[in-house]
Amino acid sequence: MDRNRLFIASCVALVTTSMVFSIRGDVLDALGNDFQLNKEQLGQLLSPAFLGFTLSILIGGSLVDLFGMRRLLTISGLFYVGAIVAIVSAPFPAGPVESLFGNPITTLLWFAMLTLGLAQGLVEGVINPLCSTLFPEDKTHRMNVLHAWWPGGLIVGGLLAFGITKVMGLDGEIGAEAATLGWRIKLMTIPIVAVAYLFLIRGQQFPATERVSAGVSNRDMLLDLVRPSFICLWICMWLTSATELGPDQWVPSLITNLTGMQGILILVYTAGIMFVLRFFGGPLAHKFSPFGLMTISAVLAAAGLYSLGLVSTMFGAFAAATLFGVGKTYFWPTMLGVTSELFPKGGPVALALMGGTGNLAIAFVLPIMGGWYENEGAAAAFHYVSVLPVTLVVFFGLFFLHFQRKGGYKPEQIGGA
């Protein structure tokens, strides 16, 4: 077993997952034009991607020990290829669409988005327990390094999308055929990276998960998942993921409408902040404790989101995005690291529940944000979502105080009581 190659393959798989996120956000308006969908319908079209993400994380996380990590990761790559091919080859409706399921074309599009979500969820369902198993001595730091490649993929996808826009002149006066070709080319970059991680895992032996290696029974695993502290952390995951990823999917369109600049640049910029800072997640979590770090993050994220709703200039957009980018950096990987450290007996299922819950929250918030955007404007959408990290300040602050009273944050040993 080559654990470094498996870790690299996990990073590339996560790059594929986040490329979908950034490129899909960039082509959203073009998709709406070609398939004649309004903003709320676009939000509904995005929802199955996150519902599929949720479903496959839960199923994949439950099947990791039974079905095997390599098989699940291979299936995810095949799903990426199939879903993208279905989207770029779909014909366009003859007129405006009243309901997504009232038209066979948009129904096909909905199922393609669902398949993309299934592919993304299988990746997440495998790489988190794989990382935890490969590096049991340094989980939170390695989770942060692994998940640095989420914003890394956002950068790759965002720059590819921006580059294609400039090369093809998609931000100027162009015909409908050129616009359609543009978003199709952008989407077709995704299967290329998916094939790359399929090559990396070819012939590799994957380890048994930490839970299986330690001989933890299914009963003990389930008992770990009904502890009050796990349930509280699970509630926090709803809020952290909605804060981080819900606004991200709308940022390109929202910022473009608020300032007139290419909104994808803001997404790339905040992703760059996250990519760099996540390599320091381990030392910072050690210094402030994981919950101290996430309390600070929630304060910054709230200020950043509210400020994004006030911007009208390029400078203001980048200033507000800096606050938001720093604030959201440590939410997802630190939540997964804490889950793995405090509930090791929960194994892949605990991580799957956290990841699945995170994506389910996004599936709910996207159409809601789309409705706010459609009916009340871009600024209101950011302002309303900023309430979520304010709530997180309270939750994480209480967790921080709880562990301080116990003498400080300490990971649990899988063989402990």
Image: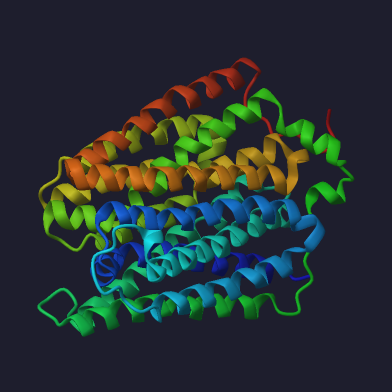
Q: Position of residue 199 (x, y in %)?
A: 64, 81
Q: In which quarter of the image is residue 158?
A: bottom left
Q: Residue furthest front?
A: 102
State the residue in front, 226 or 398. Answer: 226
For the view shown, which residue lies furthest in the top direction? 405
Residue 85 rendering spot, x and y as whole percentages? 47, 79
Q: Measuring 42% from the left and 74% from the top, which residue is drawn there? A: 87
Q: Please name the residue shown 38% across and 32% down the image.
A: 388
* In front of the other: 335 or 288: 335
Identify which residue, 261 or 299, lies in the foreground: 261
Kindly indicate the quadrant of the structure image that contains residue 157.
bottom left
The spot of residue 234 in percent (x, y) is: 58, 34
**Viewed as shown, does residue 325 lie left or right of 253?**
right
Q: In which quarter of the image is the C terminus?
A: top right
Residue 130 in view in this figure: yes
> In percent of the image, x 27 and y 62: which residue is there?
37
Q: Residue 78: where, in percent of width, then height?
A: 60, 75
97 with respect to 256 (left or right): right
